Image (tube, coloured by chain):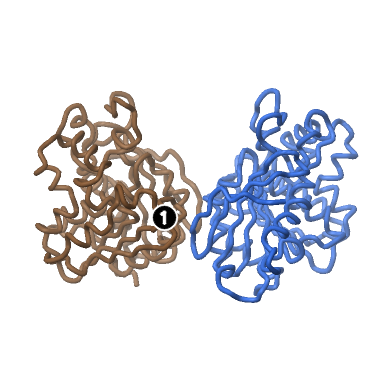
Chain colours: A blue, B brown
Amino acid sequence: MTFKINQEIAVCGGRLLKLSHESIATKTSMDVNVYLPKQFYQKSSKIIPSIYYLSGLTCSPQNASEKAFWQIQADKYGFVMVFPDTSPRGEGVATDPENSWDFGIGAGFYVNATEEPYSKNYHMFDYVHNELPKSLSEHFNKDGKKIDFLDNIAITGHSMGGFGAISGYLKTLDKNQYKSCSAFAPIVNPMNVPWGQKAFKGYLGDDKSKWEQYDPCQLLKVVPSKNNDKILIHVGTNDPFLERELKPDNIVEASKGTTWENKIDMNIAEGFDHSYYFISTFVPMHAEFHAKNLGLI
Amino acid sequence: MTFKINQEIAVCGGRLLKLSHESIATKTSMDVNVYLPKQFYQKSSKIIPSIYYLSGLTCSPQNASEKAFWQIQADKYGFVMVFPDTSPRGEGVATDPENSWDFGIGAGFYVNATEEPYSKNYHMFDYVHNELPKSLSEHFNKDGKKIDFLDNIAITGHSMGGFGAISGYLKTLDKNQYKSCSAFAPIVNPMNVPWGQKAFKGYLGDDKSKWEQYDPCQLLKVVPSKNNDKILIHVGTNDPFLERELKPDNIVEASKGTTWENKIDMNIAEGFDHSYYFISTFVPMHAEFHAKNLGLI
């Protein structure tokens, strides 16, 4: 449960901590970056909420820390940012036999693998939605609760991480784990696209009923929407993965006739691609959305 | 003089253009990124000024484009950003025989080399301060002047590029080339630090009178300050290169008794390092400084 501080970097009005810790869920050391905003250093009694950002294929915690510019927004509204890794890593961790970039290391897909050899380490769902929040809360709140890593929290992510955010949000909605959910260019219907099919087959096997337990388009049908929950999504028209992997229409269609109808706030952004140039452009809107839901504005 | 558009990326309210062109000064193809702010796409008759950002050792035009977040500021005030490369590159371009990262390719030091074999291609001073602005102006203003790349312009840079910015500003002050100059963690006294000595010896030879023609601490003595010109500088106290390569005190000391006394606005930022986390934090202040000098506020 102890975190090692590998680096502490001054940025904006706060500090980015590059941390690592031994995970029970993944049986490996996991890297995670945490941005503590300026409000953390101003001695106030207010408890600071957190936003979890799940990165896309090939990313480590560094990419979004360097390029998404959540830090400016974190200082503006007063929230902590958590940037988990995208998979277990290190010696002994199985990866794609073909060493591709869309499966295995860097591509954990935020599920709990049930298939050998991935079932040993690839428990990213438990890690991200259960172990990590608890470990962060224990670590940072030793001397009294300063940061809320468990209750007043929100989730977002990009591409594979956008899938992870929506899937994790829906699968924990019964216990109200996240106050809000958003996604940048998410894979919304993994069962029906190549990246998702490869991942689900590899991590979960051939039984499609197991796939359905993670697929947002399936989850919308079985997880009732509460109150006025909306899921905020941006996708760019110049995203090279739009038609083949993202298929944003699928989740809007899937919501029809369910309690989620008209609650998928899908924004198709003209001219934007799949990169951090796209993400960083819409981070301010997503930050404002979550800040409202976290009671910061 | 023609630019090839290799990529055009939507970011913030404008577009980042990844360009390349054949340079006469360096006798190579040169990469340059140009950010056109939202104001460029709003049909206004206002001519948009430009800021040139010179990058540090090992960088290409991509690093600052991705991590410095000038785009937000460019949209806020309405200026174009130009991100030139740090050296000539490609087949036939001489580099450090030891392939080090602090000399040769990626480390052109923004001087006109006079020593073989570097004198063939390493004419970065002429390229950045003369050929590039003219070429950009011709290319973008074919159908009437929309962007000012030549007159209402400012210059800034980081580390080696901070040196390049200050040196270039002072060396062209007689013709008022730049309206303002700022720098992030600049090498202010290259003659007296290892990076600068290696570069000057390699590109300019042993004659120290040639070194003095580029060294900001020497230039302050011979270039008279005009009006209320201030040079804005930020350096972090956790910068690993602070004592050995940057020596910020040297330029403040050198200004004493010259027309530049009290005109070096040196800000030592507690806890910051040498990275883009540091740069991006202070970009908003530098943007405001230049915007004022460019008549935008």
Q: Is residue A21 left or right of residue A282?
A: right
Please give left or right for residue A271 compared with residue B177 in the image: right
**Label 1 neighbourhood size at 10 Å, few (<14), some (14-19), many (20+)?**
some
* Residue A37: image location, x then y, percent: 57, 64
> Is residue B294 among the parts visible in the rendering?
yes
Vertical placement of A228 versus A130: above or below? below
Question: Closest to the observer: A180 or B31?
Answer: A180
In screen coordinates, is A83 left or right of B89? Answer: right
In this view, the residue in front, A181 or A177, is A177
Q: Quadrant of the N terminus of chain B?
A: top left
- Residue B278 lies, in percent from the top left, at 43, 56
Total numbered labels: 1
Chain under numbered label 1: B
Query: Residue visible at 73% across and 56% down?
Result: A133
Q: Position of residue B244 (x, y in %)?
A: 30, 48
In the image, what residue type sits under mark 1?
Answer: Asn
Q: Tell me: residue A135, above or below residue A214.
A: below
Residue at the spot x=21%, y=69% of the render? B262
Asked whether A274 or A257 is in front, the reply is A274
Q: Quadrant of residue B224?
A: bottom left
Residue at the image position 58 percent from the left and 58 percent from the top? A35
Specify the quadrant of the image occupied by residue B248.
bottom left
Q: Which residue is mark 1?
A: B238
- Image coordinates of residue B70 in percent, x first then y, are 42, 57
Q: Is residue B39 visible?
A: no
Q: Secondary structure at mark 1?
A: loop
Res A137 → quadrant: bottom right
